[in-house]
Image: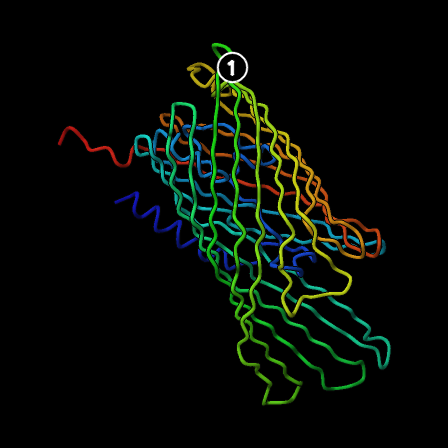
Amino acid sequence: MIKKVILSACLLISFVSFAQQGTASPYSFFGIGDVRFKGTLENRSMAGVAVEQDTIHLNIENPASYASLIQTTFTVGGTFATSNLKTTSQSEKAQRTTFDYLALGIPMGKFGASFGLIPVSSVGYKIRNDNSATEGALNSQLDGKGGVNKVYFGLSYKIMKNWNIGADAQYNFGKITTTTIEGITGVESGTAEVNTSELSGMAFSFGTMYQKKIDKKTSIFSSLSYTFASNLNSDNKRVISVQGDSDPYISPTETTKLKLPNKLNVGFGIGQSRKWLVGANMTFQEDGQLANYYNEASNVRYESYSKYALGGYYLPNYTSFTSYLSRITYRAGLKYEKIGLIVNNESIKDIGMSLGAGVPIPGSFSNLNFGIEFGKRGTTASDLVQENYVNFSVSFSFNDKWFVKSKFQ
C-alpha cells in the first residue's frame, strides 16, 4: 500500500511540475524549445556518460540497460537552476525549479522493463523592447512557455551474460504558447497575438550494450543507441486582438508536421564495477524540421547536433562497515555540445562541467544523489545572448524486491 501511495504521489507531482516553465533561455524561442537532457542525475553528473550495465541504477539513456537490473528501481529527480543572461551592454538573472524525470525499472530474469515520464524540451522566455521614452516608437513584448514531454515504455533482453539489447516506444506530447504584444508610444491601441500549438507523436529507439573483462577486475564497456526520425503533429491556433476590441480574430486550427531527426549515441569506457569508471560518449543528430509558423526567422538556421562527453565515477569501498564516506560514489564529467542552432551566423554551443555524489541509504541498495553543473551557452558576439548557468540537482533512487512472493505468512 505504501509503495502505491508513493508512486501515485510522485506521478501527480511530476505532471504538475512538467506544466511549469522549465527554461529561461531566449534560444528556446526556436524550434520546439531547449532540448532537455534525457537521463538520470547519476549519468548527468558524469556529463551524460552511461556505458556501464549498472545493476542498481536505472539508465534511461539506453533501453538495453534494463535487463541488468537486479532489483526494482524507482527514481525521480529535480533541478534548481540559476542563469545569468548577458549581452554586450545588459545582463539579467533568472531562476527556475523543475522536475527532470520519473521512471521505474523492473527486472524479469533475462528480461527487464522500464516506463516513465521525461521532459523532451522546454520553452520559457520573456523578451522586451521598451521604447516608451520615444514618441512614435514601437514597443514589443514576447513571452513563451510550455514544451514537449514524453511517456515511454521499454523492454530489454540479456542475450548473453555480457550482452544486452533493448527498445523503447515513446509518446511525445505537449503544448507551446507564445504571446506577442506590440504598441506605439503615444497611441492608445495596441495589438496582441497569441499562438498555441498542441503537439503529439510517436517515436522509437533501439539500444545495445556489451562488456568484456580484460583481466580479473577490469572490464571494457560499450554502448550504442539509435532513435529513429519521427513526426510531431502540431495543431496550431492563432488569436489576434486589438486593445479595446471585444471581437478578436480566431484562426481555424491548422495542422503542421514537425520532424524530429535521427539520433545516434555511442559510448565506450573502462573500469571496475562498483569501484571506478572512465568513459566517453558521443552523440550525433541530423538537423530536423522544427520551425513552426510563429517562430520562423530569416537570421536563423538549423544544423546537425553533436555532443562530446568525458566522465566517470570513483567508489572507494562499497562494502565498508567502518567508513560511511568510503561508500559514497563520487562523479565528474565534461561536455562540449553544439545545440543545432545557428543565429546571426553564429553556431550556438554549450560547454559545461558537472560534479556529483551518490549517498547510500543505510540498509538498502537505495541512494540519494546530488549534482552541480555549471557552464556557458551562446555568445555575446553578433548581438546575441550568452548564458552562464549553474544547476543544482537532487534525485532519489529506491531499490527493492517488489515482485518477490513471500515464503512466510
Name the residue nearer the viewer: 46 or 293: 293
* Quadrant housing residue 319: top left
Q: How crowded is mark 1: few (under 14 residues within 10 Å), some or many (20 or more)?
A: some
148, above or below 331, in the image: below
Q: How many labels does the image show?
A: 1
| The N terminus, quarter of image | top left
Residue 73 or residue 81, whichever sits in front:
73
Residue 308 appears left or right of 326: right
Q: Is residue 11 left or right of residue 224?
A: left
Q: Quadrant location of residue 76? A: top left
Residue picked out by circle 1: 218
Q: Regarding mark 1 in the picture, which secondary structure is present there?
A: loop
Q: Which amino acid does label 1 sit on?
A: Thr
**Residue at figure coordinates x 70%, y 55% from the top left:** 302
Q: Look at 59% across and 89% down and name the residue there.
A: 246
State the colouring used for the structure image. Answer: rainbow
Which residue in the rendered view is the most extreme toward the left? 409
Whole-percent x, y for residue 394 in the image: 52, 40
Estimate the x, y position of residue 118 in percent, counting from the top left.
48, 49
Q: Position of residue 279 (x, y in %)?
A: 59, 26
